[in-house]
Amino acid sequence: MSTQSRPKWLLLLVAILIITNAASLYFLFYRQPSSSHTQERRSAILSFLKSDVGFTDVQLHQFDSLSNLHRESSKPLYDKSAGVKINILLKAASQSFSDSAINLAAQSISEEQDKFETLMLQHLRNIRALCTPEQLPRFDSGFYKLIVKRKRSAGNNANNK
């Protein structure tokens, strides 16, 4: 193989890798969780709020309203974030994943993740505001278990596919 054709092959290989990575990221970020997984998660949250915290039917209805608002406000951010992450990674790839490109990509991705975490914490604060003073200690001592369980089950579901 001549030295002149070597860069062409490398460019082709890099282009294929970028396209493959972009496609993988698309499926990773745009793929919606299955409705059965969503139902399981929703049932677990409702069970925790009703059984462990002691939410009344009125509080559960208020929780449904909050959840719908949260879902509506976070969906555009989620949809936009997938494209932003792809662009961040493509930019890092175009800079040959130099140390500065990696640091900038990590910082940009962290900023995107920060938006999600802030939104989730605000949602938890809003749910907590539905609690009566007697329910607050039960909510405060148990909600994190539910979140940890959700993260574990999401990781297990991803590993099982």
Image: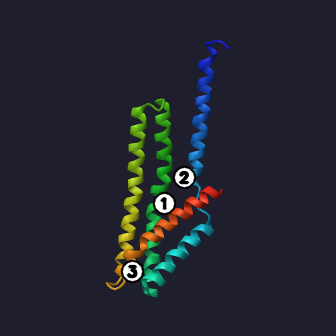
Task: State the CA–CA distance, disc 2 to disc 1.
Answer: 12 Å
Q: Nearer the viewer, mark 1 or mark 3?
A: 3
Q: Nearer the viewer, mark 2 or mark 3?
A: 3
Q: In the image, residue 36 lies at what x, y percent?
A: 62, 69
Instruction: Determine the residue positioned at 42% across, 40% down.
Output: 105
Q: Which residue is mark 1?
A: 75
**Lower position in the chain sequence, tag 2 or tag 1:** 2
Instruction: Determine the residue positioned at 37% across, 60% down.
Output: 118
Along the horizontal axis of the image, is 56 left or right of 27? left
Q: In the image, residue 151 lies at what x, y percent?
A: 51, 62
Callout 2 crowding tier (Cα within 10 Å): few <14, some 14–19, many ≥20: some
Q: Which residue is mark 3?
A: 138
Q: In the image, residue 143 lies at what x, y percent?
A: 42, 73
Q: Nearer the viewer, mark 2 or mark 1?
A: 2
C-beta proximity under 8 Å, tags 1 and 3: no
What element does badge 2 sit on? Answer: helix
Splitting the image into 4 quarters, where does residue 8 fall? top right
**Lower position in the chain sequence, tag 2 or tag 3:** 2
What element does badge 3 sit on? Answer: helix
What element does badge 1 sit on? Answer: helix
Q: Which residue is mark 2?
A: 29
C-beta proximity under 8 Å, tags 2 and 1: no
**Lower position in the chain sequence, tag 1 or tag 3:** 1
In the rendered image, which quarter contains the N terminus?
top right
